[in-house]
Every structure is written in C-alpha cells, then in structure tokens.
Image (tube, rainbow, N blue to C red):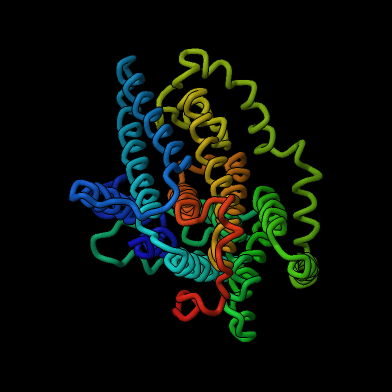
Amino acid sequence: MLTVYLLCLLVIPSNVTIVGLGTYGRPSMLWGLVLLAWWVLWRLEGGVPPAGRDRQVVRIAMGALAFVILVSFAHAMLRGQPADQISPAIAALVRTASWGGVFLVAVDGLVDTDDVVRLTRRLVVLTGLIACFGLAQFATRRTMLSWAEGIPGLVFGADDFSSRGMFARAVGTATHPLEFGAVVVGMLPLTIAAAVSGGFRRDRALRLRWWIPATLAALVALVSVSRSAIVGLAVAILASILGMPRKSRRVLTVAAGVAVVVVAVAVPGMASTVVSLFTGASDDPSTLSRTNALARVPDFLAASPLLGAGFGTFLPRYYIFDNQWVLTLVELGIAGAAALAAVVVSAIWSAVIAAKGLDPAGAVVARGAAASMLTLAVLFAFFDGLAFPMSAGLLFLAAGVCAASYRMSARPETASRLPSIPLPESRAMRDSV
C-alpha cells in the first residue's frame, strides 16, 4: 500500500488531477485518504499495533499537530472568512488527513526491519528514476510530460518549466523546480545509505549498482541552478557522514568532490552561475523577498498569535513568504509552528535512538531517515514545502519510518545484550526490489 503511494506521489506528475475533483483530485492525496480509511477500519476491527516500545513521541507530536490544525480551522471559521479562503482551508484539512493516513500506516504497518528495508529500497530506486528524468529535462530543455495529457479521465495542469541564466531548471514530475530539487536532495541521505551498504547487501556488483541513484540525485542538485538545492546537498551529505564508518566517510567526501569537478567541466558556465547565486544573493529579488517577509510576520500574526490565521487561509495575494516555517507560524500560530517542529525533532531523535537497537540493515535505514528529515526541515526554510504534494508527502512518510524504526528497536539499556544479526542473513537481504 505504501509502495502504491510512492508511485502515485513520484511517478504520476503532480499537476495531474482526476476530472471533476479539482484540488482534491491528485492521486497521491486520494491514496493517502484510502490509507487513512484502511487504518481506521483496522483499528475499529480490533487491530493492535505491533509489539515494541510503548511510547512513541512522534505519534504524540503528530497528534498535537493535527489537533492544532483542527482548532485553528474552527477558530478561523468562527471569526469569519472571505469566500475564497474557505475552500482552501477545507482542502488543507483534507491534505492533513491524507498525510495522517500515510504516517499511521507506516508506523503500524511496517512490522519489522525487513519491511522498512524493502520500502526504502523502492523509494531509493524511484528517487534515482525521477532524478534521471530531471537530468534528461535539463539536457533537452523539455518537460517530456506531454504523454499525461492524453490519458482519459485526467486533467493535465500547466507545468512550471523555467530557466535561470542559460540553464533550464528541471521540474521532474513535481509542480515546481524548487519542490523537485527539495525532494531529490531530501531523499539523498537514504540513497547514500543504500549505496554505502550496497543496498543492504555485501555482493560487490550489487553494491556498485546502488551508487547509481545516489550519483543521479547529487548531479540533479548540482545542475539545479538553485541555492536551496545546493544548501540541501551540503546538509544531506554532512548529516549522512555523521553516522558512517570512517572509511565510508572518506569515500563519500572524495566522491562529492569528484562530482563537483565533473559537473564544472562537463557543463560550461555552471560553476560560475552557481557561485553567482551566492555572491549576488544580497541583490537577488527572491532573497530580498524572503528577508523582507520576516519583518511582516508580527503584523500578520497580531490578530491571533497562538492559533494563527488558519491552515490554508493565508493566500498568495497577501504575501509570499517562500518559507514553510514562517508560513506555519502565520497560519497556525506559535502552537502550530511548535507542533510541526516537534514532529521533525521527535522523528530525528526516535531514528537516532532506534539505530542503537536494530540490526545493521535497520540501523542504516533509521540513520538515513533521520538525515532525510533534517534535510527536508532545512529546505522548508527556502519554500513553502507543505503546499507541494511531493515534499509534504515524503516528510510525513519519513516521519512514519522513523517512528516505526523506534517502535521495533530494543531499548538502549538492553541493546548491548542483543545478539548481533549478520547483514547477509536478514530476510531483506534475499528479497529483490
């Protein structure tokens, strides 16, 4: 079920919707609602979560975030809203329900590390495929998404394929180049984890094969012509290095340096363009807009500092922050921003703790999921990530993987007494993608 969600999220273009459903017609959002309904029916029929740790702080944080969103919505509706803000607010509630379905199925449906490893391998493969697709768009300066226009029952929205300087900005299957870069870079730690561990195998040929998705994802970031993607790339690599053996750290550092040199030589003008993005940031309109937005926050927050204006009600006509953390503060107030931060922090903490009590394959995935959560959290400071389906869906899926890893891990004080599980003997080692 989660694999189908990944296919809907990453393979089907995000601007494709089902005829007649409008904003509610994205296949990934609808499948998230199916997951939520499935989880609710399972619990009503007496389903019991798998045995493991009793308290899961990520589940509590996620519940707090959903509660704040509901209370903020009620507060906003009671104050009265313009007609054109009511529909976006309701759509935001539906998106929240969809994210909740993905999170809950991941937490309670991934029973053991074999399930987590299989799901992660599939995510890594899909990340490599969309990264390859993005590189093809960059090289051909075409979206290559016209095939979706002829599918009966679907509506193909306008794509946002743009350029910066002399280079095309790949959009992949996302709705915007920023989202595409954030998704590929955000999943990079998991692709690095799979590459370093050879896809959780020890066979040399298979180990080399798993470097392909990681290489493609890194190349997409380097040719994205985006400051946020470059910053995210640095965060992803640093976060991944922290949990690696010393030899793997050296390999990754050298590989990153080689990739930078290859791109600089193979794509003339790319190095100077990327450097100018940072040296000329003080005069860049998008940077100035983000900086000036911070001064406007107190004015927008003054009416309701605790609960905000209401999730989904702050339309672009008021202001475009290009910063999900600031937008969350305005829409959900201090309570909502704190709840979203709690989801991120608790997920990272849970995965780091879980890595101490899992078998080698599970520990690699847990550390990779924690690094992905950190990378996405940093990237959310550069664009309104929860307004885009791919970045938001992967954030809550990664949070669910972190929580599931924590549930199935041993307690830290007993982890040292667990028998060591050799990597090749795990059932996940024998399963194909």
Position of residue 230 in the picture relative to residue 389 (left or right): right
In the rendered image, the quadrant that contains the N terminus is bottom left
In the image, residue 318 above or below residue 147? above
Residue drawn at point x = 77 percent, y = 71 percent? 262
Furthest toward the left, the residue is: 45
Res 241 visible:
yes
Seen from the viewer's position, the closer of residues 26 and 170 is: 26
Residue drawn at point x = 45 percent, y = 52 percent? 407
In the image, residue 342 above or below residue 232? above
Seen from the viewer's position, the closer of residues 292 and 194 is: 194
Q: Position of residue 421 (x, y in %)?
A: 55, 71
Residue drawn at point x = 61 percent, y = 81 percent? 202
Seen from the viewer's position, the closer of residues 5 and 362 is: 362
Position of residue 226 in the picture relative to residue 259 (left or right): left
Quadrant in the rendering for residue 3: bottom left
Position of residue 404 in the picture relative to residue 76 (left or right): right
In the image, residue 291 above or below residue 171? above
Q: Position of residue 399 (x, y in %)?
A: 48, 49
Q: Position of residue 231 (x, y in %)?
A: 70, 49
Q: Position of residue 344 (x, y in %)?
A: 54, 42
Seen from the viewer's position, the closer of residues 280 and 370 is: 370
Res 390 visible:
no
Quadrant in the rendering for residue 266: bottom right
Q: How many marks?
A: 0
Residue drawn at point x = 30 percent, y = 16 percent? 78
In the image, residue 223 above or below residue 346? below
In the rendered image, the quadrant that contains the C terminus is bottom left
